[in-house]
Image: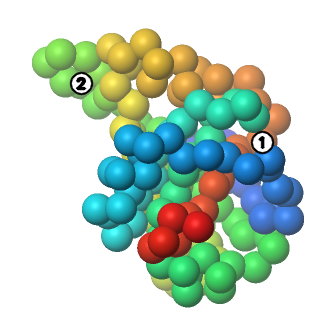
Amino acid sequence: MTKEGDTYHQHDFQEHLPAFQLPADLAEFLQGEEYACVTAASNQGTVHVIKAHRAGIAGMGDRVPLRVSHAVYEHHLAPVIRTVVKLYDQPERPLALETFINVAEADQRTDFAALGDQAALHLLFYDEDLT
């Protein structure tokens, strides 16, 4: 179902991807963040790397409704795409995360464009220890 740039999905957390090795620079960035969501290229296409508390990750069931929305913002250097991912494991308190794509950066633009060709939205969860 689609509504003004929003996409609604039912995510099956039983679908597992092959191991994704966090690049050193991404792991270093994530260490300093309590919560984070970034896009990254992988051998399975573009993935959303999500860092959250272990208890929150463990509390999610196998199937979780989620909402993905995109908005374009003008910036004096280049447009920026804001993506918000909301996971409704607790419908009254969804986990909401955002990431930004700078369309002037070729690798970011390519990763974002690849999402449109993928059959699935890949979410990779990491806890405080990045495990």
Residue 75 higher or lower than 126, as above or below: above
Residue 99: image location, x then y, percent? 40, 45
Question: Residue 63's mark?
Answer: none
Other-residue count near label 2 (Cα within 10 Å), few / some / many at <14 / 14–19 / ≥20: few
> Residue at the spot x=82%, y=62% of the render?
12
Element type where label 1 sits in the image: loop
Disc 2 is placed on an element classified as loop
Q: Nearer the viewer, residue 119 or 38?
A: 38
Give the numbered dot on residue 74: 2
Quadrant placement of the C terminus: bottom right
Give the spatial CA distance, label 2 vs label 1.
28 Å
Quarter of the view holding residue 104: top left
Identify the disc placed on residue 120. Answer: 1
Q: Nearer the viewer, residue 5 or 41?
A: 41
The residue lying furthest to the front in this view is 24
User: Residue 62, percent across and down?
Assistant: 81, 73
First-in-chain label (2 vs 1): 2
* Residue 34 visible from this viewpoint: yes
Q: Residue at x 45, y 24 (%)?
A: 108
Question: What's the residue type where badge 1 is placed?
Answer: Ala
